[in-house]
Image (cartoon, rainbow, N blue to C red):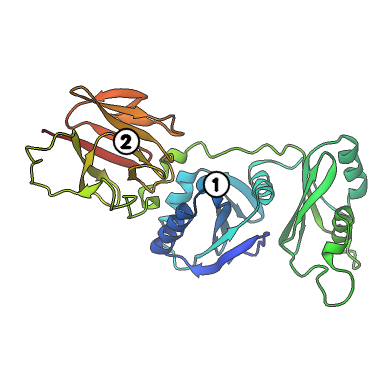
Amino acid sequence: MTKEIFPEGEAVFRHKPHSAELFTITVDEIDKAGESFIGIIRVDEPDAAYFLFFLRGDAYAAGYITNGKPMPLSIKDFVQHMSVVTDKRTLSLSKIDPVLLKGMLVFLQREPSLKATTDMINLENILSHIKAENAPAFVVLKKNSMYNFFYFHSGEPKMAHFADASWMQAETGPQREEIPLLEQVLLYAYPPDKTPVEVMVYRDIKTSEASDTSEIKQFLISDSLLADRKKIIEQAPVETPAPKEEKAVRLRIEVTEGPQKGSKFNVPLPCTIGRRDADLRIRDMTVSKRHASLEASGKNIIFKDLDSTNGSMVNGKQVKETELSNGDIIQIGDTTLKIQFVTN
């Protein structure tokens, strides 16, 4: 596996043999955790490490590092890479705090304003400039393939995340937590044996969400499509017509793309569709919590996008609100639904 070691926060599991099933289960558990989850799926290979970042339960960005070079990665490319079968790949899952999430994204998405070893620069002087400018920054110190992150807010060191977990954690002597953060930075950068440490200083710490979250592949969708089977949504017999006495307007929704391809469900109106807090629940990370609604307006059926993040399409066209016809195709995220009217 790769030699690069990063702060991992709270490890849920480490270095399990990768499989498509494990990946799908992991993503599904993250989705179930909902907005409380901030973390990383890390995939290790012999010559690279890949990262998929989650913010408030949603896939946010991706990246990788190979031969010591960090690179951003689209989520689509991450998923495509995961689809390539290899028996030398492990999967790890960690919960992290927002500062470490931002630091990792800065590391993968931005070029450092300074990159040098401690025998070539005066780090203390550089940190003094950051303080004088009252500026935010990340300082990353790399030693023995371990990347340690230090966050500066308004020129002052505020938080450290060590990959080198054993540093200053001996049974005797001062503990890391007892040492002021600025002193921790300098002590780590200038060890007693004078071994040069690589320094990366990031002054531009703006980060961005992946631009292609709507293109996540279908295997990120959970096999479980429905929120609560005791509610109004029920499995529909394929050939059974609606009872004549049924007065409520109904739709039959067929899943034409996704793990439940071919399934059909009778849905009373009105009905909301979304990843959470919806009548018809779709565990698809590219679908918003309350993504869209279906409702009757006289004899017409109206589809509305509820200000979703990634938008909605009907018959291949982006829509905010539209009247549906029998046989229309709705796409939300990576899920495709075919609408069939059930006459009263």
Q: Amino acid at mark 1?
A: Arg
- Counting from the top left corner in percent of width and height, residue 74 is at 51, 43
- Counting from the top left corner in percent of width and height, residue 89 is at 49, 65
Local packing at callout 1 (Cα closer than 10 Å; few below 14, some 14-19, many 20+) is some
* Residue at 56% in and 39% down: 209
Image-based side of 326 in relation to 150, left or right: left
Local packing at callout 2 (Cα closer than 10 Å; few below 14, some 14-19, many 20+) is many
Give the residue at the far bottom of this rendering: 171
Q: Is residue 42 above or below residue 211?
A: below
On-image quarter of the N terminus:
bottom right
* Secondary structure at numbered mark 1: loop
Q: Which residue is mark 2?
A: 331
Res. 254 in view = yes
Image-based side of 72 in relation to 151, left or right: left
Task: Report, in whole angstroms, how far the alpha carbon at label 2 lies from the one at label 1.
Answer: 23 Å
On-image quarter of the C terminus:
top left
Image-based side of 139 in relation to 50, left or right: right
Q: Amino acid at mark 2?
A: Gln
In the rendered structure, which disc, 2 or 1, sits on the residue that comes first in sequence?
1
- Counting from the top left corner in percent of width and height, residue 237 is at 13, 49
